[in-house]
Image (cartoon, rainbow, N blue to C red):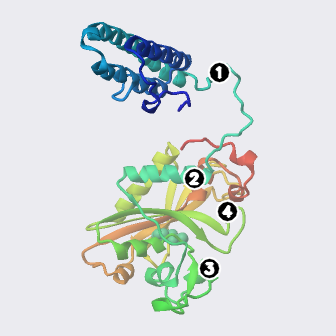
Amino acid sequence: MNHPETPTGSQKPAPLNMSEAAEAVRTQFAADHARVAANPSPKAVEELRLAFLGRKGRVQDLIEGLRNVAKEQRPEAGKIVNSVRQDVDGAVTALQERAKAWILNERLNIPQVDVSLPVDDSTPAGALHPVSLMRRVLIREFRRLGFTIYDGPEIDFDFYNFSALNIPESHPARDMQDTFYVAPATGGAFDGQKMLLRTQTSNIQIHAMLAEKPPLRVIAPGRVFRCDSDITHTPMFHQIEGFVVDKGVTFANLKATIDTFLKAIYGRELKTRFRPSFFPFVEPGAEFDVQCTICSGAGCRVCKNTGWLEVGGCGMIHPKVFEAVGYDSEEYSGFAFGFGIDRMAMLKYALPDLRQLFEGDHDFLGQFPVHA
Ligand code: PHE
């Protein structure tokens, strides 16, 4: 607020005599004071103070002018100057007080919110996708069991998705998984190597084991891709891989882990069953079913009239896998499992068709809780 009229040291009037000079300062101060008093911002008040009371201010000029006054007139002149100084000082102090209130007012002048107005709900609130909800719940429960979260690539080398998992080239298990291949790698150490969209989160077993030393307790949620589509299959779906490697890990630990987290997730005792099954990277291997929540086991189209829904595979990590990552299978054992997150969401929210999850229908998606 640098007002052109703001008096500065360079605009001193030549003193005529002391009382006239003092009067001139009073007049000038009265004018400047009136202007600042109308809007006493801290800056304006400080400028006024410096102009009159500062080291080069006009009151100081008067005091210095006393030196030129004849000795006998000095006491009288001194009184006049002193009274000007006191008046100016008092007025400036009063303005400084008002400047404090001015700051407060500035703050209070922020536009007020009328809390009694009706809510404008024309902007719809977002909700979490059921798959995201399910993933969050899973992560929360596994964290409680002491698992660490790991991530891995969706486009990966054949090595991580297959070979290192004891699925060699031309193994029929490769056909089971309806793989989407992408162009082979070019250049560098990986030149010509087959690449694919991972068909399972099991690739993260290899990435994690190559990067870490046991003991390991890992979960890894992620997207996987298979060329497959019906009411319980979509070409992209979500899995959560879990694995534990340590000394003395047994199949009983695997069953206990699965039972514990299923109970935590579904909040009730769900009937579950393990069926012996084959995955090249586990031995023994099992598939894991949960009683169908849509028909409570009576049989329906979702469970293909079996009363059971297959949720995932599991088993004890195969020594060949340990060999591929350089772990000693005499010293360590481990279990692994891979579940479909979408299947689990389907069971939790009793969804009749898995494909609903990926159609982006707002009416459908808006029905789920906002928080996991
Ligand atoms: N990766 C397997 C699948 O996608 C599931 C699995 C994971 C089985 C870990 C055993 C151990 O079918």
Q: 230 or 271, which lies in front?
A: 230
Residue at 54% in and 93% down: 192
Q: Which of the two discs, 4 and 2, labels the residue nearer the N terminus?
A: 2
Counting from the top left corner in percent of width and height, residue 191 is at 51, 92
Q: Which residue is mark 3?
A: 179
Verify CB contact (< 8 Å) between mark 2 and mark 3.
no
> At which x and y percent is residue 4?
56, 31
Toward the viewer: 5 or 97? Answer: 5
Q: Nearer the viewer, mark 3 or mark 1?
A: 1
- State the image coordinates of residue 338 (x, y, percent, origin top left): 49, 65
For marks 3 and 4, give the CA distance.
Answer: 18 Å
Sequence-wise first label, 2 or 1: 1
Give the spatial CA distance, label 1 vs label 4: 51 Å
Q: Which residue is mark 4?
A: 232
Q: Report if the beta carbon of the residue with label 1 is closer than 8 angstroms to ligand 1.
A: no
The residue at which mark 1 appears reads as 114
| Circle 1 or circle 4, nearest the eye | 1
| Residue assigned mark 2 | 132
For discs 2 and 3, the disc positioned in front in the rendered view = 2
Q: Is residue 102 above or below residue 150?
A: above
Residue pictured at 69% horizontal, 21% vertical: 117
Label 3 with label 4: CB-CB less than 8 Å: no
